[in-house]
Image (tube, rainbow, N blue to C red):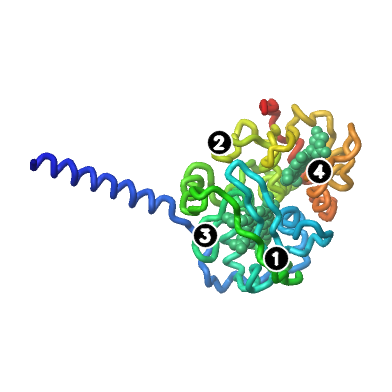
Amino acid sequence: MLRGARLISTAVAAVLLVFSSTWLLTRPHPRVVAGDPTLTSGDAGRGRLVFAAGDCASCHASPGQPDRFRLGGDLALASPYGIFRVPNISPDPEAGIGSWSVADLANALISGVSPSGQHYYPAFPYASYTGMTLGDIRDLYAFLHTLSPVPERAQPHQISPLFRIRRFVGFWKLLFFREGRSGGAENGDPVHDRGAYLVETLGHCAECHSSRNIFGAIKPKTRFAGGVSSEDVGFNPNITPIGIGSWSEQDLVEMLRSGMTPGHGYVGWVMADVVENTAELPEVDRMAIARYVKSLPPRPTPHP
Ligand code: HEC
Ligand code: HEC
């Protein structure tokens, strides 16, 4: 009798311990203090280039209209977990992020945490943006505030009920997210190192050009080696030397400026959107991207 009671209380204690440590481990950790007075708005002109390099418009511009600066969101992103609806990030205080501070934007991009302290889904590629400098985020903030407010709210995500519990993203982060580290390594050559930042962090090129595991995280061995598109409508090419070994740095610079490839005409589809942005960058940044991409180790193309 006594033994049974002790067993039950041990079991209850174990469950409570697992529950509370899980709760602690999956807690959102915003990097920046909400009211940090040093985090003032930056330079909107430079922020425009951060916005281009980050390819924010490809997801956040309202679909079905030509203005890439109308950031009403609502684009549907299909995924194995359901459909994500990209939010409105225009400066509208109600429907968008007009009431946010620079710290709020920094915590979204670096930590994947919202102003109300909830995890974002990694469909928002913060696993790459996490390496962004605070200087770039301040400039981006200033630029976003020059755009027109869009008063319409984006629709809510249509994902399965289990995934609606944002706290579960904490497990994903424990396994796959390294705050402040976007991947890649610097080698001391300033052109290469600028390229590493543009490719790994801002340009989040690996998010498309890699394969993912069942949790939707990039498999390291396939990084840049290509993979099925997240919407399952094609195969994103291998951009390591196995795929584009015959391209010169100059070929890459040309593609990033005009979309023209050395072999087969022009890149299309979502890569054409990427090129709309890389075309806006200064030539030195395209050269930096090219130098870094050419330095990637060869990795075999994974089987879809
Ligand atoms: C691949 C598509 C994609 C790209 C590229 C992208 N985002 Fe997002 N973003 C999303 C999705 C999806 C969400 C919603 C995440 C969620 O609900 O958890 C989001 C959420 C956000 C939020 C939070 C909005 C809110 O209302 O809480 C901000 C801010 C944001 N993105 C800014 C940016 C900026 C700035 C860039 C460019 C540097 C960018 N995003 C690039 C898809 C994208
Ligand atoms: C939103 C997904 C996405 C992102 C982000 C993206 N790409 Fe691509 N990329 C593609 C797709 C899809 C293609 C194939 C386009 C085609 O076949 O017309 C492609 C094609 C390419 C090619 C041509 C490969 C070949 O064999 O023809 C290169 C090089 C390339 N991307 C480099 C980059 C770089 C560098 C970045 C980051 C600055 C980047 N991509 C970001 C999806 C993406």
Q: Find the residue positioned furthest to the left.
A: 1
**Circle nearer the viewer, 4 or 3:** 4
Q: Quadrant of the N terminus?
A: top left
Query: What distance separates the C-alpha of mark 4 from that of mark 2?
Result: 25 Å
**Which comes before the other along the chain, label 3 or label 1?**
3
Q: Amino acid at mark 4?
A: Trp
Ligand 2 quadrant assignment: top right
The residue singled out by tag 4 in the image is: 269
Query: What distance separates the C-alpha of mark 2 from that of mark 1?
Result: 36 Å
Q: Are marks 2 and 3 in contact (CB under 8 Å)?
A: no
What is the number of the mark on residue 139? Answer: 1
**Which comes before the other along the chain, label 1 or label 4?**
1
Q: What residue sits 60% from the left and 54% below the top? A: 157
Q: Amino acid at mark 3?
A: Arg
Query: How many numbered badges does the structure rendering display?
Result: 4
**Which comes before the other along the chain, label 4 or label 3?**
3
The response on whether ligand 2 sits within 8 Å of label 4 is: yes
**Which comes before the other along the chain, label 2 or label 1?**
1
Q: Are marks 4 and 3 in contact (CB under 8 Å)?
A: no
Q: Is residue 15 left or right of residue 167?
A: left
The residue singled out by tag 3 in the image is: 31
Secondary structure category for the residue under label 3: loop
Please provide percent x and percent y for residue 153. 66, 66
Query: What distance separates the C-alpha of mark 1 from that of mark 4?
Result: 29 Å
Secondary structure category for the residue under label 1: helix
Secondary structure category for the residue under label 2: loop
Please provide percent x and percent y for residue 262. 89, 34
**Which comes before the other along the chain, label 2 or label 3?**
3
Pointer 2 local density, CA inside 10 Å: few below 14, some 14–19, many at least 20: few
**Circle nearer the viewer, 2 or 3:** 2
Front in this rendered view, residue 114 or 292: 114
The residue singled out by tag 2 in the image is: 214
